[in-house]
Image (tube, coloured by chain):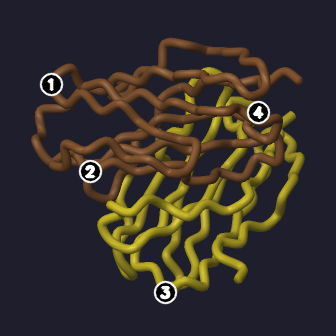
Amino acid sequence: NAGVTQTPKFQVLKTGQSMTLQCAQDMNHNSMYWYRQDPGMGLRLIYYSASEGTTDKGEVPNGYNVSRLNKREFSLRLESAAPSQTSVYFCASSEAPGNYGYTFGSGTRLTVV
Amino acid sequence: AQTVTQSQPEMSVQEAETVTLSCTYDTSESNYYLFWYKQPPSRQMILVIRQEAYKQQNATENRFSVNFQKAAKSFSLKISDSQLGDTAMYFCAFMKPYKLSFGAGTTVTVRA
């Protein structure tokens, strides 16, 4: 029962480098989400995909891009990492529209130096 | 703008005692969903309890219960008979279709 799988779990980047965070779910959920968690600010929505083939901006989309590769996979890309993007990133999924809550991955701790 | 407000950054409770976490939210909608999530040191986000706004009855899950006051837009979480394993950060969350908005969190420490 894998649920939501995120890779990698930890990553250190230099300013200006790019990387892609991977997320896959095996629950046949329609909707997927990317959040970032910063101290004192809770979790903030970066992007979401309500269904396969659609993506929409959340609260803090600047500096990020996403791809809903298929129903299972939803990736988050940082094109040119900045220290302000140092955070813990969570992927989540849900049955649309999410009224029964989300299932979260275990998170990726990203440090940009 | 912050939709969900948790006014207690930290709380401490003795093992076996009760602790109540507060949460208020802002919405003009009449039908919505509210959640409490637990995040232990492992970082995993775990759903604790869920409340549907159109239901007047407060949700309960074992030692966890909520006090939902719709008119006051308040959604507090009560943890009864606190256990060491309850030590975690707790997040209140408000559901709009497709988007879950979180409060800043309350860190709960259970003392032995």
Label the yellow chain with its letter. A
- Res A72 → quadrant: bottom right
Q: Is residue B41 left or right of residue A38?
A: right
Q: Residue at horizontal 54%, vertical 41%? A: B64
Residue highlighted by disc 3:
A28
User: Is residue B91 depicted above or below A93 in this figure?
Assistant: above
Asked whether, in this view, residue A90 is left or right of residue A66, the answer is right
Q: What shade has chain B been given? A: brown
Q: Which callout, 1 or 2, points at the residue further toward the start of the chain? A: 2
Count residues near mark 4 (Cα–Cα under 10 Å), then give few for <14, some for 14-19, many for 20+.
many
Rendered residue at 46%/39% (across/down)? B65
Asked if the residue at tag 4 contacts the one at tag 1, i.e. Cβ–Cβ closer than 8 Å, the answer is no
Q: Nearer the viewer, residue A100 or A33?
A: A100
- CA gap between label 4 and label 3 equals 32 Å
Mark 1 and mark 2 in contact? Answer it, CB < 8 Å: no
Residue corresponding to mark 2:
B52
Q: Between tags 4 and 3, which lies in front?
A: 4
| Tag shown at residue B71 | 1
Q: Alpha-carbon distance for marks 1 and 2?
A: 14 Å
- Asked if residue A62 shows in the view, the reply is no
